[in-house]
Every structure is written in structure tokens, then in C-alpha cells.
Amino acid sequence: MIVDDYSRYTWVKFLRSKDETPDVLITFLKTTQVNMQKPVKFLRTDNGTEFKNNKVEEYLESVGISHQYSAARTPQQNGVVERRNQTLVEAARTMLSQSDLPLFLLEKVVSTACYTQNRSMVHRRFKKTPYALINNRTPTIKYFHIFGCKCFVLNDRESLNKFSAKADEGIFIGYSSTSTAFRVYLKKSKTVIESINVSFDEEMASEQQRSEPVITGILAYGQLSSGPTSQQNKSDEPSTSTNHLSDLDLLF
């Protein structure tokens, strides 16, 4: 996990082992400086051997980046990254549990949590999202969808006959990091694909929002009782309170 000290923008890199850290870190630094058109001045890491080795030090010295270390056996000095890591892990655990998805999708879930939080969490000091601070423009979230919702992907990968289904059912698991597309987990083939031809079925979420008769009933009763009184309202008041008595019982 890599965090920009100014904007708190976060990048997540997944490694099979710590031996891959030097190559991934060097590639990230090169790519980031080209994309942002800004030089990296300092690199702060812990005293782990994956960061403290000759390969990383030689590259940092060649490009003029200062390497700063935290004190050994002092995780408190890594507070920014440690807290960010814990936030993403907790979000990913909640998303997996809520959507009832298999554990091998953990990488995609963490990437999705990082992607959405960079565009939605507001920096306390600057009152802007990390994406807005690092890119100097407000991000758009119109294409955001509920994680784990049912979706249907146009089957343009196979040759179909006249009566074959044109779409495959899947589960929405995030956004592509290399193209403008959605990531979908196909139940039929148990694979993850990226496609833009996706239709989302978010009816479950909308039904959950509509399934609140208790609150609706109490609000309706409050509006009736607080309105202007008339002879008709007075005659209807006992029946109104009786109708919503069951709603109060369910609420409490």
C-alpha cells in the first residue's frame, strides 16, 4: 500500500512474496512521476528488508529521492499507512460478507474499496477528495453501482445461435484499472471478466429502501396530527391513531 502524503491518495499493489517489492516499487515511482508530472521528493518506509536493500537504494540515489525510515520495531510511526490498510481491509471484509462472495475475490474487493474511497472520502483539512487534490478536478461518480448486485453481461465472446441467451448473469465486483469497464464475476464459468456492456439489477437495494412501512406510517401520522384541525380531521383522528398503533408496536 502506497499513500501520497499530501492528498492521502492511495494505491494498492498485490504481491505474491516480498521479493517482488523492489521491482514493483521502482516501476510505480517511474509511472507515477510521468503521470503526475511531478517529482517524488521523499520515500518513507519501515525498516523491512523489502525496502532496505541495495536495489532500491541504488535507484533512489540515481533519481535523487531521499529515503526515510521509521524507527525499528515502532509501528506507531507508520500510522498513516497502517490505518489506511486497516480501513481497506475492514471495508473489504464487510463487502465480502454482505455480498456472500468467495474469498479468492479478495484482491478485486480491496481494489474496489480503494477505488471508491479515493473518489468519495473527503480530506478533513482541504474539504476535498484525494482524487480531486491529486488530479485538480472533481471526480464523477455517476457510474458507481452497488457492490455485489446482480448484473447481466452481453455475451459477445461466443458464437450464439438464434435461441441462445444473449447475456450471462453475474455479480458486480468493481471497476477496471486499465480501461473504462466494469468487473463482473460470472456465476456460470466462475471467472472474472471486464466489459462495458453490463446491465445492473439494483432492485434489491431499492426494495430495501422501500421496505420501511413503520417509519412511513409514523411520519404520515405525524403529518396528519400536525396539520390544521377541522371537524373532519377530529372525527378521523381516533381511527388514524388506531391504524398506526401496530406500527408503533413494531418499531419499539
Image (cartoon, rainbow, N blue to C red):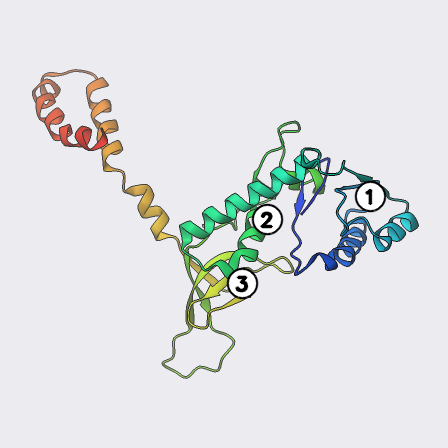
- Residue 234 location, x and y as percent? 10, 18
Residue 99 place in picture, x, y as percent = 41, 53
Give residue 82's quadrant in the image: top right
Task: Measure how far apart labels 2 and 3 are at the Cα level.
Answer: 17 Å
Residue tagged 1: 40
Q: Is residue 82 left or right of residue 158?
A: right
Name the element at disc 2.
helix
What residue type is disc 1 on?
Answer: Val
Q: Residue, x 42% and y 67% (percent of image)?
A: 187
How far apart are the two marked residues, 2 and 1, measured between alpha carbons?
22 Å
Q: Residues within 10 Å of mark 1 (few under 14, many from 20)?
A: some
Work out whether mark 3 precedes mark 1 in sequence or the reverse, and give the earlier one. Answer: 1
Give the percent coordinates (x, y) of residue 151. Answer: 42, 61
Q: Which is more N-terminal, label 3 or label 2?
A: 2
Q: Secondary structure at mark 1?
A: loop
What residue sits right under mark 3 in the picture? 196
Q: Earlier in the sequence, mark 2 or mark 1?
A: 1
